[in-house]
């Protein structure tokens, strides 16, 4: 349960931070938005270290799937994006990958 919460918070910080930088630069909202985005992106790096699994490569690989699904969700909420069935299928495949990478039974 803890790792899912960490993945969720990490996604919120990374996707939100990138969105803030995008808004600041591409949508001309200013450097305050860029600065807030940079802070959020730095916090993403900190939050990721809170994963219970100590294998950096495994955690980051699994997080990639969370990022894909979270990015689509962010786009729906923040930008009014309407994913098609292929977007949804791709996100589902990614989340299955997260489950396999992070939660498959492993011998010690």
Image (cartoon, rainbow, N blue to C red):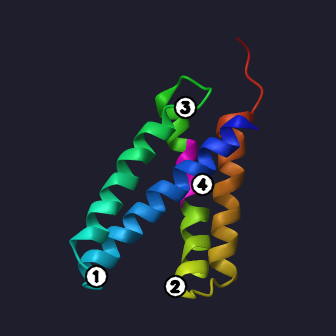
Q: Secondary structure at mark 3?
A: loop
Residue 8, image x and y in percent?
Answer: 62, 51
In the rendered structure, which disc, 4 or 1, sits on the residue that comes first in sequence? Answer: 1
Most common secondary structure along the magenta stretch? helix
Q: Secondary structure at mark 2?
A: helix
Of labels 2 and 1, the one closer to you: 1
Q: Residue tagged by mark 2?
A: 79
Q: Give 71 or 87, whichever is nearer the viewer.
A: 71
Which residue is the extreme one toward the top? 108
Distance from the alpha carbon under mark 4 to that under mark 1: 28 Å
Of labels 2 and 4, the one closer to you: 2
Distance from the alpha carbon under mark 2 to that under mark 4: 19 Å
In the rendered structure, which disc, 4 or 3, sits on the residue that comes first in sequence? Answer: 3
Q: Residue tagged by mark 3?
A: 50
Distance from the alpha carbon under mark 3 to that under mark 1: 32 Å
Of labels 4 and 1, the one closer to you: 1
Of labels 3 and 1, the one closer to you: 1
Of labels 4 and 3, the one closer to you: 3
Q: Quadrant of the N terminus?
A: top right
Residue 34's place in the image compared with 2, above or below, is below
Q: Give 76 or 43, whichever is nearer the viewer.
A: 43
In the rendered structure, which disc, 3 or 1, sits on the residue that comes first in sequence? Answer: 1
Identity of the residue drawn at 54% across and 22% down: 54
Label ID, residue 29 = 1
* Extent of the magenta region: 62-67
Q: Is residue 54 magenta?
A: no
Mark 2 touches mark 4? (CB < 8 Å): no
Left or right position of 62 against 49 = right
């Amino acid at each position: 349960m803890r790792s899912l919460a960490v993945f969720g918070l990490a996604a919120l910080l990374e996707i939100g931070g990138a969105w803030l930088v995008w808004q600041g630069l591409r949508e001309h909202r200013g450097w305050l938005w860029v600065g807030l985005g940079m802070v959020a992106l730095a916090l993403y790096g900190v939050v990721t270290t809170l994963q219970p699994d100590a294998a950096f490569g495994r955690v980051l690989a699994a997080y990639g799937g969370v990022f894909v699904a979270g990015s689509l969700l962010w786009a729906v909420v923040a930008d009014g994006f309407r994913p098609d069935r292929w977007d949804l299928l791709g996100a589902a495949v990614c989340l299955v990958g997260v489950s396999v990478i992070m939660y498959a039974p492993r011998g010690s």
